[in-house]
Image: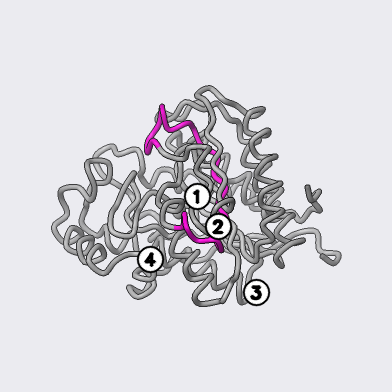
Amino acid sequence: MGTKTHCNVCVFYGPATELYSFPDGHPLNSARVKSFWGLLKEQEEFLRARIRRCEPVMAQEQDIMRFHSKEYVSFVKKASLLGHGYLDAGDTPAFKGVFEASSYVVGSTALGLDMIMKRSVQHAFNPVGGLHHARRDAAGGFCVFNDAAVAITLAKEKYGIAKVAYVDIDAHHGDGVYYEFEDDPTVYIADIHEDGTYLYPGTGHEYEKGKGTAEGTKLNIPLQPQSGDAEFSAAFSRVQTFITKSQPEFIILQCGADGLDGDPLTHLRYSTATHRLAARWLHGFSHQACQGRLLVLGGGGYNVQNTAKAWVEVVKALSERKMVQIV
């Protein structure tokens, strides 16, 4: 790893970042990323040499359709022009420009992947990314296009990555990633979430470990309501063992902050220590296992202050290069 003590991190932020914002008091709105960026700027002196602000970019439709069906993309485009109704059963409202806003999310995540693979930055963070509920042909849970799934597909198809590890610590199970790659033995998924008995989308049971040749390449760890840092730490120790054995060539972390104590939509009681733990370990491991190839996506988080604090901890962890213990 050489003598460098820090890493250069691309953080996507600009006017287009704020476009992915549902109207009329919806819990997923632009206040989250505005608060995060404002708090991150207060750390500017500490992070000045390490953080590179990157402008969001729109995805090409062909990249969106590497994962999503042509029919679904057309449906979103039409709903975007109309600007009313829902893209799913009632969680994800359409608004004028939702297609463009969603395309910026995918495009920024895809660009982060490209920059990491081309080594123009060491790591990238897209705070408005991590839309892990969208399926190939449907929206779900505030998620229109699944940028994480697009990134996994791009890593494999564009760059020939043989094994991708996807770690998801959002309070909600990442069903749109898990079930779309459930039978893919090249995608290792570890997902810590609140038990689906109590929380949307009601999936991610511990017995779900992959199907067919992918049996054993998936790890679901549902936690009971009121679980806090101790329970998360115990669960993450299992993730460490699982990811270490997977020997990935690329790692994606979805670091949703809706598991923090005080989130209005969930029942977990984490502190920001959970995000610091996950990001620090995966960062160090990525340098030992896969040339530092680590892409991070924001995900959920509906207490604005909590989310900002958790994501700043993630960015700090990405910027500080530390050795980790391989378990």
- Looking at marks 4 and 2 on the same chain, the residue that comes earlier in the sequence is marked by 4
Picture quadrant of residue 90 = top left
Query: What amino acid is found at the position of numbered circle 2 in the picture?
Result: Phe
Count neighbours of disc 2 (C-alpha within 10 A) and say few if under 14, some if 14 to 19, many if 20 or more: many
Q: CA distance from mark 3 to mark 1?
A: 22 Å
- Kindly indicate whether the residue at mark 1 contacts the one at mark 2 (C-beta within 8 angstroms): yes
Horizontal side of residue 71 vs 308, given as left or right:
left
Report the residue marked by disc 1: 298
Q: CA distance from mark 4 to mark 1?
A: 20 Å
Find out whether residue 307 is within the magenta segment.
no
Report the residue marked by disc 3: 119
- Report the magenta residues as a range: 181-202
**Element on which disc 4 rests:** loop
Report the residue marked by disc 2: 125
- Indicate the quadrant containing the N terminus: top left, top right, bottom left or bottom right: bottom right
Q: Nearer the viewer, residue 59 or 199?
A: 199
User: In the rendered view, would you say 315 is above or below 122?
Assistant: above
